[in-house]
Image (cartoon, grey):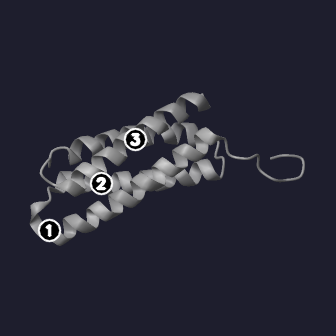
Amino acid sequence: MTQSGMMPALTQQMQDCIEACMDCHNICEETMSSCMQQGGQAQMQVMRAVMDCSETTRMCADMMMRRSPMAGDMCMLCAKVCQMCAEACMSMPDDQMMMRCAEACRRCAETCRAMAGAAM
């Protein structure tokens, strides 16, 4: 904290990473809803990956916003989870929502890897 008790401003890199995490979180939530509407067509492995990614990206963004000392470690974990989700979604190439989710996950993984590297 600064002398006035306020946290320092977020860097542009942090803001970009938080935005990518929240975009990914939102798309994962939409993807889960879409899968539930489809019923049994969605594979359980894909659904678990999407759920994990949704939760991880939200937590990662929260940790960066509050400047947690663990944010760098969380960004690295988030990058791994997002990559796993992107790969799972790619297993359903005929589903447009899955392809949208995979792209958001890849973007988020990239920004999280960069953020984790900057935090070290």
Q: Which residue is mark 2?
A: 50
For the C terminus, the image quarter is top right
Sequence-first disc among 2 and 1: 1
Q: Residue at x 89, y 47 (%)?
A: 3
Q: Residue at x 38, y 56 (%)?
A: 54
Q: Residue at x 22, y 45 (%)?
A: 88
Can see residue 49?
Answer: no
Crowding near pointer 2: few (<14 within 10 Å), some, many (20+)?
many
SS class, disc 2: helix
Q: Which residue is mark 1?
A: 38
Q: Is 73 displayed left or right of 65 in the figure?
A: left
Q: Which amino acid, by three-letter code, is at mark 3?
A: Arg
Q: Which amino acid, by three-letter code, is at mark 2?
A: Val
Sequence-first disc among 1 and 3: 1
Observer-side mark, 1 or 3, equals 3
The tag on residue 103 is none
SS class, disc 3: helix
Q: Are marks 3 and 2 in contact (CB under 8 Å)?
A: no
Q: Position of residue 96 (x, y in %)?
A: 20, 55
Q: Which amino acid, by three-letter code, is at mark 1?
A: Gln
Q: Is residue 52 above or below residue 81?
A: below
Observer-side mark, 3 or 2, equals 3
Sequence-first disc among 3 and 2: 2
Q: Which residue is mark 3?
A: 107
Q: Marks 2 and 1, how far apart in space?
A: 15 Å
